[in-house]
Image (cartoon, rainbow, N blue to C red):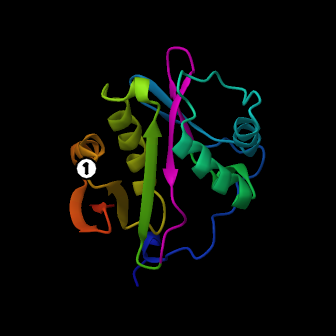
């Protein structure tokens, strides 16, 4: 062990910041604002009601609904959620990104992301994942970022490779990518 806080893997979710502390999870790129999700917005999306943000055509897609359903079931606070990927120009939600669970004992943390079909192949995914990776690399305990991609999803594979991920393995129909933090 060293004095580096990354040498102390967290076993529990991080404490929520006080209500008056600004959320440092808002990420901005040239064309996007990657906004922290709230439980209220996630639950509204799942109920089919207004989440308080304008939604782009095709959002949320089926994979998002499934993932958000699990998140809403287990999250206890807004700080345990992911992010909405929104267009900076008008705030429309075009996708989402986040982590799958917590940092494990080896410092490994898996990410996930998705965009509505109309916004794919335009560089938005690369922008959002680059911002997410940059933020996660600054978190204590994170030593390696991982991502799972369905074999054959070449667009997602190329996105991860552009961000710096390296193919680590292939198993059970998935490519596994890794990026040292």
Query: Is residue 15 positioned above or below 149 on the image?
Result: below
Q: Is residue 97 magenta?
A: yes
Q: Secondary structure at mark 1?
A: loop
Quadrant of image for the C terminus: bottom left
77 horizontally vs 66: left or right: right
Comparing 100 with 170, the one in front is 170
Span shown in magenta? 83-104
Location of residue 125 (image quadrant): top left
The residue drawn where x is 77% and y is 43% is 20
Q: Is residue 25 visible?
A: no
Comparing 82 with 55, the one in front is 55
Query: Is residue 125 positioned above or below 81 on the image?
Result: above
Location of residue 51 (image quadrant): top right
Quadrant of image for the N terminus: bottom left
Q: Could you tell me residue 85's position as x and y percent?
A: 51, 33
Q: Could you tell me residue 129's position as x and y percent?
A: 38, 43
Query: Is residue 147 positioned above or below 135 on the image?
Result: below
The residue drawn where x is 63% and y is 51% is 81
78 horizontally vs 7: left or right: right
172 horizontally vs 128: left or right: left
Give the residue furthest to the bottom: 1
The residue drawn where x is 28% and y is 46% is 153
Q: Is residue 125 magenta?
A: no
Q: Could you tell me residue 92's position as x and y percent?
A: 56, 21
Q: Could you tell me residue 47's position as x and y percent?
A: 76, 38
**Residue designated by label 1:** 152
């Amino acid at each position: 062990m060293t004095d580096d806080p990354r040498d102390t893997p967290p076993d529990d979710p991080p404490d929520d910041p006080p209500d008056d502390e600004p959320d440092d999870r808002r990420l901005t790129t040239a064309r996007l604002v990657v906004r922290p999700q709230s439980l209220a917005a996630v639950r509204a999306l799942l109920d089919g009601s207004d989440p308080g943000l304008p939604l782009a055509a095709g959002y949320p897609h089926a994979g998002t609904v499934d993932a958000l359903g699990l998140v809403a079931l287990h999250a206890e606070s807004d700080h345990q959620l992911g992010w909405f990927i929104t267009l900076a120009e008008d705030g429309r939600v075009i996708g989402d990104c986040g982590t799958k669970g917590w940092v494990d004992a080896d410092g490994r943390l898996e990410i996930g992301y998705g965009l509505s079909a109309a916004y794919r192949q335009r560089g938005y995914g690369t922008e959002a994942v680059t911002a997410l990776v940059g933020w996660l690399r600054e978190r204590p305990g994170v030593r390696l970022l991982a991502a799972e991609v369905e074999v054959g999803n070449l667009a997602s594979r190329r996105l991860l490779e552009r961000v710096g991920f390296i193919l680590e393995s292939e198993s059970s129909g998935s490519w596994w990518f890794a990026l040292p933090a």
